[in-house]
Image: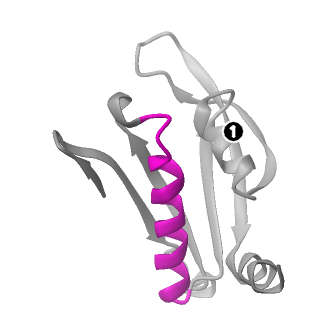
Amino acid sequence: MARDDQGIVGTGQFHPAWAPHQLHRADVAKLIVHRRGRQQGIGRALMHALEARARSGGFTLLTLDAKRGEVAEKLYRKMGWTYVGVIPGYALNADGSGPSDTVIFYKNLRRAAELTLSE
């Protein structure tokens, strides 16, 4: 969670995979930054914290989805997440304007840690 002088400005969470053969994996369920906190590096800081927490919990693979064309998609690409593909019409828009496409990403935390150590 991220706070500013007005209160909570961002939050992020991940959920461990439920299947017994996927104990190494978790899904990033939400990364949300309030409008007043955008363009300040809060999303990046929250994602770094999520990744570190996942690593310390023994997870080696994270997955997530993001609305196609939004700021979050650009952030994940810049942070080294691997693009998998697009699912058309995956989620309904909050404003009721119909379905939107989602972009699927993953990050191999073991590989990312190796790259960081070798740099």
In percent of width and height, residue 100 lies at 61, 23
Q: Residue at x 73, y 49 (%)?
A: 78
Residue drawn 25% across and 51% down? Answer: 3
**Which quadrant would residue 9 be assigned to in this image?**
top left
Q: From the viewer's perspective, tell me whether residue 54 is left or right of residue 112.
A: left
**Residue linked to disc 1:** 74
The answer to whether 103 is drawn above or below residue 18 in the figure is: above
Q: x, y percentage for residue 70?
A: 62, 29
> Depth check: 103 or 19 in front?
103
Residue 117 appears left or right of 27 = right
Q: Residue at x 46, y 41 (%)?
A: 40
Q: Which residues are magenta?
A: 38-58
Q: Could you say which is closer to the camera, residue 49 or residue 15?
A: 49
Q: Is residue 94 magenta?
A: no
Rendered-image quadrant of the N terminus: bottom left
Q: Is residue 9 left or right of residue 18?
A: left
Quadrant that contains the C terminus: bottom right
Image coordinates for residue 27, horizontal then vertical, percent: 54, 64
| Element under disc 1 | helix
Measured along the vertical axis of the image, is residue 24 above or below residue 95? below
Residue 89 place in picture, x, y as percent:
65, 26
Tell me which colouring the rendered structure shows: one colour
Look at label 1 and name its amino acid: Lys
What secondary structure is the magenta-colored segment mainly?
helix
